[in-house]
Amino acid sequence: MSRQVFDEIKDLITESRNPATMEIDAKSTIEILQFINNEDRKIADIIAGEIPYIAVAVELIVAAFKTGGRLFYVGAGTSGRLGVLDASECPPTYGTDPEMIQGIIAGGYKALIRSQEGVEDVFEQGAKDLLDHGFSAKDVVCGIAASRRTPYVLGALTKARETGGKTIYLICNPRSELSIPVDVAICPVVGPEVVMGSTRMKAGTATKLVLNMLTTTAMIRLGKVYENMMVDLQMTSKKLEERSKRTVMLVTGVSYEESGRVLEQAGGHVKTAVVMILAGVDSEEARRRLAQAGGFVRQALIS
């Protein structure tokens, strides 16, 4: 088995040596940092080439959300942690139900704070964990694996296809090396890491950027952003309460005191407060307009 794994990883780009950093161990602190920064600067341009595939993934996610489906991220190690991070940040940012976007990591909660060696190697566990979360044909799974060979992730993706759900695969190796069929593959090939095999670096950064794009774009497509501001955030902390007031002030031009008063009438809902002020209606009418407009503030203002 060990030899099989060796053969699987020896030719992966993510496991290759980077010729630009061969002497990094002999460099000064400033020079090491410059090496890292030089490599990181390549990532955004590489992701730009994947935008057509990211767009397909977004459409799958939006379609699922509109029919009551959910998005599941599945990964191990750094990939799993990034999926859980992205999922956990959506409810406070966009007011989503915590069930709507979920992160599943090999090894469970303990793996979030301490590496759980070997858990990523169990193909069947990925499938089981996905089903334990209630995955159905209405849902989408986004498997995340920089190397594209993680058995845990492959198990989840395989089970998702068998269940009838949609599948997205985010890897940092070439699309030509995909090992299983999926609905769409996102493949930012960021090249060898500064330190060989340390995929928490460039691969991790690329993964975070893509996940940001997936959920942010999906939320915008669902009407959770007006202009370039979050208008479905939850006032669950003092910071978010004050951000809500500031958002209402920026959009409508009202005072701090007035924004707080209208937000109170709107039940703390920024969208409702914005429509109340700009359309000159009460909270009940604002909610009716938003419902009729599918949650989009722009349409609610002209309905």
Image (spheres, rainbow, N blue to C red):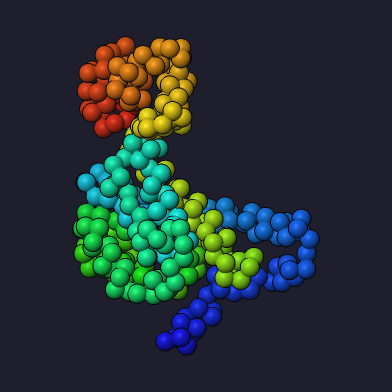
How far across and how far down the image is residue 257, in percent?
Answer: 43, 12
Residue 152 appears left or right of 6: left
Residue 234 appears left or right of 45: left
* Residue at (21% x, 46% y) in the render: 67
Seen in the picture, residue 302 relative to 195 is either above or below; the reply is: above
Q: Is residue 201 visible?
A: yes
* Residue at (27% x, 26% y) in the render: 290
Q: Is residue 185 visible?
A: no
Q: Quadrant of residue 132?
A: bottom left
How far across and how far down the image is residue 163, in percent?
Answer: 21, 64
Q: Nearer the viewer, residue 125 or 253?
A: 125
Residue 66 appears left or right of 88: left
Q: Quadrant of residue 301?
A: top left
Q: Quadrant of residue 258?
A: top left
Quarter of the image with the C terminus in it: top left
Quarter of the image with the N terminus in it: bottom left
* Residue at (26% x, 32% y) in the render: 294
Seen in the picture, residue 89 relative to 239 is either above or below; the reply is: below
How far across and how far down the image is residue 34, in percent?
Answer: 72, 56
